[in-house]
Image: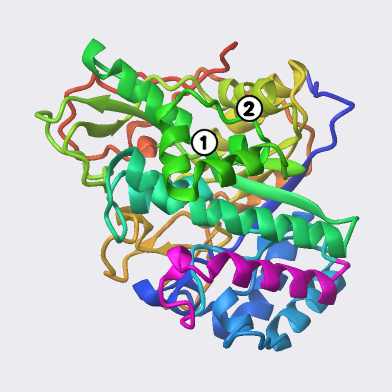
Amino acid sequence: MRARAATVPFFWAVGIENTVNPALGWDQYTWTAHRERWADDLRLAAEVGVTHVRYGVPWPDVNPAPDTYDWTWPDQAVALLRDLGLEPIWDLLHFGTPPWLPGGLRDPGYPAAVTAYARAFSERYPQVTKITPFNEPYIWAFFSGGNGTWPPHELGVQGFARSLWPVLAGLRGAIQAIREVNPHAEIWLNDGADRFRATTPALTALAGELTEWRYAAFDVLCGRLERNTPLYAALAGVAGADVLEAALNDPTPPDVIGLDYYPGSEHAILPPHAPPHPGDWGRRPDYRLYPDPQPPGLAHTLLEYHARYGLPLYVAETSTDTRREDWLRWLGSEVLHAQERGAAVLGATWWPLFDHVDWHIGLTRLEGHVCPSGLYHLNPDRHDRQPDPALPFFRDFIQNPLMPADVSAPVPQDALNVTGAASPLEPLSGLQLQPHDV
């Protein structure tokens, strides 16, 4: 049966990993040789058969000094995307600020600077109408302030709030500037769709709190943050209660919410005496983080966001290193399941088009390890783009209507990034990812 929700349009996209943060030494565009071959890479995206691409020229490149902009690269990229018939979902900022903001995303000048940048971009490119002002605000705040993964390695709700509030202040300014300049622009804001499940009763409250954090940026922007919560108190302590209340009473919601959903996006938290898992990149002393062997699934998550916000959704990032055909079939089934239950799911993005570097350890160390997540692989040289064996299947799959998956084939253990890990959880060999009702 080739059924799908007829009233909901659907597109397929690819994304080009563009994490660039000079202060932390991150530059995916250099590591993958995209800076030299960006035009060929955009042509490669068109050849895959998608209609959209998540893409952006790094802010530090465009804005090398205060009030100084170099539009050479984005001018050429926007023109080539037009010629290729690819619609960009443009990333303005993917974790990195220009060096002239020495405090980075916590610099006092950051909100005004990113607002000016968003305004200047929208004035120059009115034809770019799908804009992501900040990639993954929750993920940034969790990794740098809540889980201790990235500098300054803070932990807990206070650290999370210290990382999140400047991002939110910048987001509000950027969104308002974009809409003022271009009433036709749409804000496509994506974030990690992580979930945390307690494995003991003692961890239940903590798992609930961590899961609520994934909503934090959307809740503030939509003016619906609950007042009687530790997160509200922490954000009020950072921003000032009057400033936070003013933001909540003057919502700046996105137009489309993007969910970044991977095989390891759903977590189980174990007591701290459990053995460490190689996929837990944080420094929290109060739990161990594992992939959940029985995740509720993407449809469940899409329907949760639909019920909470009532906004259109899309899968902004997804991929797996193994069994890609099975993952795509399952993904299509989950999207279809959510659409049939009322969620407006507009599209899905394979991220990345070609491999990225060092994300297997969350960029906590710079080892130069190529992660084989792309539809094209960087071997034997970073300038190479060797097609994955699943590429013909992907090309065919995205041309056909979404179909219910054959869920009898399990997504294998290594798709959940637990290969070689001594896990105190139940075995994963029989795991089947199936659609779930909310």
Identify the residue position indicated by label 2 in the image. Answer: 305
| Quadrant of res 277 | top left
Residue at figure coordinates x 49%, y 45% from the top left: 138
Magenta stretch, residue numbers = 99-127
Identify the residue position indicated by label 1 in the image. Answer: 193
The reply to whether callout 2 and callout 1 are in contact (CB within 8 Å) is yes
Q: How many marks?
A: 2
**Is 16 located above or below residue 193 in the figure?**
below
**Is 251 located above or below residue 378 in the figure?**
above
**Is 256 located above or below residue 43 in the figure?**
above
Q: Indicate the secondary structure of the residue bearing disc 2.
A: helix
335 within the magenta span: no
The foreground one among 261 and 333 is 261
110 within the magenta span: yes
* Residue 400 x %, y %: 78, 37
Q: Residue furthest front?
A: 242
Q: Amino acid at mark 2?
A: Tyr
In the rendered structure, find residue 395 and report the number of the disc placed on it.
none
Residue at figure coordinates x 14%, y 30% from the top left: 272
| Quadrant of res 151 | bottom left
Colour scheme of the picture: rainbow
Q: Amino acid at mark 1?
A: Ala
* Residue 420 x %, y %: 20, 40
* Residue 101 x %, y %: 48, 77
Q: Is residue 252 visible?
A: yes
Q: Is residue 134 visible?
A: no
Residue at figure coordinates x 52%, y 26% from the top left: 227
* Residue 199 x %, y %: 26, 17
Quadrant into which the N terminus falls: top right
